[in-house]
Image (cartoon, rainbow, N blue to C red):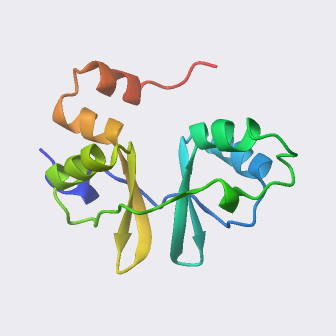
Amino acid sequence: MATKVRDIMTGSPTSVSPELDIVTVARAMRDEDIGAVLVAEGDDLKGVVTDRDLVVRGLAAGGDPAKAKIGAIASRATATVGPDDSLDKAAQIMRERSVRRLPVLEDGRPVGIVSIGDLAMEEDSRSALADISAARPNF
């Protein structure tokens, strides 16, 4: 059974420049079948954008999504974990901060992302959340 974040995280997370437009990032997320991207300038993590952020802060805000910059809708990454942190610590931070995903930083550089679904699949592979997290989209 995994005990450390590195055991269950998604490595090599997709990172985008804060200067990219919302449409480009949305297409990348669709093509890569991911629900979140890290927003970074080089190795400097600036924030996180989820599929929900694209809709709520991007599209619903109006304006031209082809011109709006992703950095403007990114949530600041105020909570992170390290790859050698325990799964319990990651779950505690998610609970305290009410977040579903945490960037994983090593030596200040983004090296992964861990989600509540990753934790659910590790803790109880038969739970409803684990089933949903493991399922491939059928659209």
Question: Left of 127 or right of it: where is 70?
Answer: right
Q: Position of residue 33 (x, y in %)?
A: 58, 38
Q: Position of residue 39 (x, y in %)?
A: 59, 63
Relative vertical location of residue 42 with respect to residue 39 in this rendering, above or below:
below
Q: Is residue 33 visible?
A: no
Relative vertical location of residue 72 with respect to residue 99 in this rendering, above or below:
below
Considering depth in this image, is 30 or 90 the residue closer to the camera?
Answer: 90
Question: Left of 70 or right of it: where is 23?
Answer: right
Q: Position of residue 99 (x, y in %)?
A: 38, 45
Quadrant in which the C terminus is drawn: top right
Q: How many marks?
A: 0
Considering depth in this image, is 22 or 124 the residue closer to the camera?
Answer: 22
Question: Left of 78 or right of it: where is 13?
Answer: right
Q: Position of residue 74 (x, y in %)?
A: 60, 56
Question: Left of 5 or right of it: where is 76?
Answer: right
Residue at x 24%, y 21% (from the top left corner): 127
Residue at x 75%, y 50% (from the top left corner): 22
Which residue is at the far front?
61
Quadrant in which the N terminus is drawn: top left
Q: Is residue 116 visible?
A: yes
Residue at x 21%, y 66% (from the top left corner): 84
Relative vertical location of residue 111 with respect to residue 75 in this rendering, above or below:
below
Residue at x 70%, y 57% (from the top left corner): 70
Give the quarter of the image for residue 107: bottom left
Give the quarter of the image for residue 21: bottom right
